[in-house]
Structures are given as C-alpha cells and as structure tokens.
Image (spheres, helix red, strand yellow):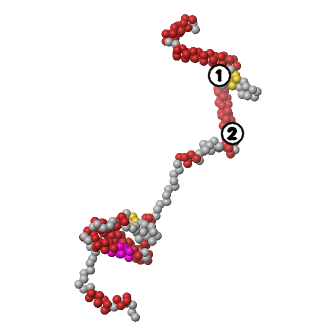
Amino acid sequence: MARNAEKAMTALARFRQAQLEEGKVKERRPFLASECNELPKAEKWRRQIIGEISKKVAQIQNAGLGEFRIRDLNDEINKLLREKGHWEVRIKELGGPDYARIGPKMLDHEGKEVPGNRGYKYFGAAKDLPGVRELFEKEPLPPPRKTRAELMKSIDAEYYGYRDEDDGILEPLEQEHERKVIAEAVEKWKMEREARLARGDEEEEEEINIYAVNDDESDEEGGKEKEGEEGQQKFIAHVPVPSQQEIEEALVRRKKMELLQKYASETLMAQSEEAKRLLGL
C-alpha cells in the first residue's frame, strides 16, 4: 500500500490541489515593513522570517557545501536578520511587544553568542572560512607591568655593587692592578726627576705634609690630646677647645642676660652697660 507522501505526489493529487487553489491568490510578504498596518500580519511575517533563518542556519552547518555556497548562505542569513529587525521595529510601532529587548540572544551550538564584526555575523561553517577565523582570534594579553613596589623588592645591596668583593675574586685582581698602577706612577716620577737633575734644574722642595701635627703647634692652638685606656686610639683637636669652667661661666652669663632682658627695664640695662664700660669690664 502506498504511503501518504507518495499519494500526495501523484498526478491526480496535484491536479486536485490545483483545482482547490484556483481563485486563491497567495499572499506575499511586503517588501517594506512600513507597508503593513496590521499587528497580527506583522507578527506572521516575523515568524515566517524566523523559519527561513532556521532552515538556512541548518544548511550552513554542512562544511561540504563549498566556500562560495557557504558565503552566499551566510549573506542571506544576515539579510534576513536585518529584515527581521525592521519587522520588530514595525511591531513595536503598532503597539506590539519590543522583541529587540525581550527577545532571546542568538547563540551557536556551543551556547556562545554568534561572533560578528560590525553587525555582520558568521554562522556554522562560515566561521572556519579563510580570513574569518583570524578575524576572531584574540591577541594574547601583554604581560602585566610591574609596579614600583614590586621592582623595589628585588633591589638589595648586591644591586648597588656592595657585594662584588664577597666572591673573593674581584678584590685580589683590584689589589694587583693597584700595585701595578702605583709602581708605574713611581717609575714615571723617578724618570722625570732624573731628567730634571740631568738638565741642572734645582730639585724641588719636598712637599709639606699638611696633616702632620707638632706638639708645639698643638699647644699654641690650645689643642688637647684625649687619651683613653691602654690600647685605645688617641684623638687630637686642631681647634681651641674650651674647658669645663669656661663653659660654665658662659652659661651663667647667658642666663644672666636672659633674666635681665626679661625683668629689667631698658633704662636699667643702659645704665648697667654704661657702668661696665666705665669700669672697663
């Protein structure tokens, strides 16, 4: 027994269907959404567009269609999406719901939002076309810059070169180089001195050591040596150092002047100064 689908395809069935549809004009979707003034029809055309989008999205999942067919399908889907947006705006103008706000987001089979660029979206196998995959590859984030506090954590004495001599290698090399430089400088000075003596020039006077301290000079300047216990270093003062008695007298004089300035009048102070001047104090 033939199935219903096969029966519907017979010539008699198609002839009967044509007779039933005689006199009926199939209503076509308006080219512009603004031409529709009825809310139920606007809803109907929106549902029709959604059905067409669903069919084409199912077709574009087949990667074997070829690059050109996939690009054409993707263009058609984007065109239908724009048309659906126009109908949603018209539905809102006619007093219907705002599908742009309450409508679901367009997601792919992984549950992610469909990727796009400037309003143009890519579906199914179109996302793997040459040039499209590179368009959505995210560049790796640059390494985060260290803050000043993080940079200061790694700065220690070794950073400033204070531990260069701890390895026991640099210091002997520096000492050897220092001895070599000193020997060269001394040899050069001796050669210059011998050359001056050969020319008959008078020998220069020896330089005076300004750091040398004589006992007589230190006594005249009032310097005093401070000696500690045995084995301790001696310190020499090159400036006059007042004694303890002189310090106490200076403090007493300062205290007297502060009291006079605080309690004595200007006339009394002037008289006191005049008396001191007459007495030669």
Q: Residue at x 66, y 34 (%)?
A: 185
Q: Are marks 2 and 1 in contact (CB under 8 Å)?
A: no
Residue 126, given in percent of the width and then of the height, sits at: 42, 71
Q: Residue at x 39, y 68 (%)?
A: 104
> What residue does disc 2 label?
175
> Given this view, does label 2 or label 1 mark the residue nearer the observer?
1
Give, as a single range, the part of the protein colored magenta.
Answer: 48-56
Residue 63, given in percent of the width and then of the height, sits at: 44, 75
> What residue does disc 1 label?
238
Return the mark for residue 34: none
- Is 170 on the left or on the right of 84, as rendered? right
Question: As drawn, which residue projects farthest toward the bottom?
Answer: 1
Query: How many residues crowd around disc 2 within 10 Å: few (fewer than 14), some, or many (20 or more)?
Result: few
Circle 1 — which element? loop
Counting the numbered discs, the total is 2
Circle 2 — which element? helix
Which of pointers 2 and 1 lies earlier in the amino acid sequence?
Answer: 2
Q: Residue at x 45, y 71 (%)?
A: 109
Q: Does 253 appear above or below 164?
A: above
Observer-nearest of 62 and 24:
24
Amino acid type of the residue tagged 2 in the rendering: Gln
Q: Does 260 appear above or below 7?
A: above
- Is 138 on the left or on the right of 166, as rendered? left
Residue 140 visible: yes
- Tell me if residue 123 is in the magenta stretch: no
Amino acid type of the residue tagged 1 in the rendering: His
Q: Does 192 appear above or below 76?
A: above
